């Protein structure tokens, strides 16, 4: 069995070619296969496969590879869209600040809450202050753990 055949079989078993089972109407499987075929065509082996797939994953998730600096060129004024004096980081869209020089920056996805049923979400309480330079990382807090006790109201919503 080739890598592509194996990948397609896994996607089929997960129901990702089925209009009924796939959240995106059967389009997820074909989209992943297109990316996977390109990856296979590039001829990656162990070390390069790990490096390339890791970098792709980080970039596809909207993460940065090097620290955010907070410099003015990293910010876009989104005041008209947001309805308040607000700047969004061009390199990482989940980072906001009060000015083009990065005043009072926050990371909107600083905490991800994970329910007992496995679903996860962010809330107002997910926002955390950050300082530059940094590579913002999300912390996951799972319902039912001692750490989650401080956020019991968040899980009740």
Image (cartoon, helix red, strand yellow):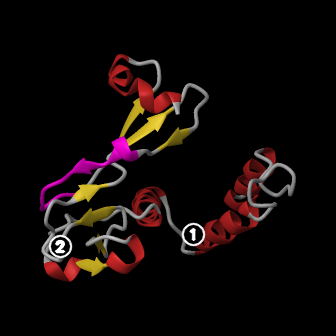
- Disc 1 secondary structure class: helix
Tell me residue 31's x, y (percent). 69, 68
Q: Secondary structure at mark 2?
A: loop
- Dot 1 surroundings within 10 Å: few (below 14), some, or many (20 or more)? some
Specify the quadrant of the image occupied by residue 111. top left
- Look at the image and say whether residue 129 sits in the magenta stretch: yes
Along the viewing direction, whichever of 144 and 1 lies nearer the viewer: 144
Q: Which residue is mark 1?
A: 39
Report, in whole angstroms, how far the alpha carbon at label 1 lies from the one at label 2.
40 Å
In the image, what residue occupies the spot 17% across and 58% down? 134
Q: Nearer the viewer, residue 136 or 126?
A: 126
119 horizontally vs 71: left or right: right
Q: In the orientation shown, which residue stands out farthest toward the bottom?
A: 73
Q: Is residue 30 left or right of residue 145?
A: right
Residue 141 place in picture, x, y as percent: 39, 31
Q: Which mark is residue 13?
A: none
Q: Is residue 151 magenta?
A: no
Q: Residue 99: which numbered mark, if any?
A: 2
Residue 138 vs residue 49: left or right?
left
Question: What's the magenta region?
Answer: 124-135
């Amino acid at each position: 069995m080739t890598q592509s055949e194996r990948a397609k079989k896994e996607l089929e078993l997960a129901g990702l070619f089925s209009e009924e089972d796939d959240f995106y109407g059967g389009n997820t499987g074909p989209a992943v296969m297109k990316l996977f075929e390109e990856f296979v065509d590039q001829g990656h082996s162990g070390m390069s496969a790990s490096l390339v797939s890791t970098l792709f994953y980080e970039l596809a998730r909207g993460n940065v590879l090097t620290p955010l600096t907070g410099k003015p060129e990293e910010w876009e004024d989104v005041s008209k869209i947001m309805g308040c004096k607000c700047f969004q980081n061009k390199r990482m869209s989940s980072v906001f600040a009060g000015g083009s020089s990065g005043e009072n920056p926050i990371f909107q996805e600083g905490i991800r809450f994970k329910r007992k049923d496995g679903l996860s979400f962010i809330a107002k309480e997910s926002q955390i202050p950050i300082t530059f330079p940094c590579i913002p990382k999300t912390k996951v807090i799972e319902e039912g753990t001692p750490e989650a006790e401080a956020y019991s109201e968040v899980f009740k919503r």
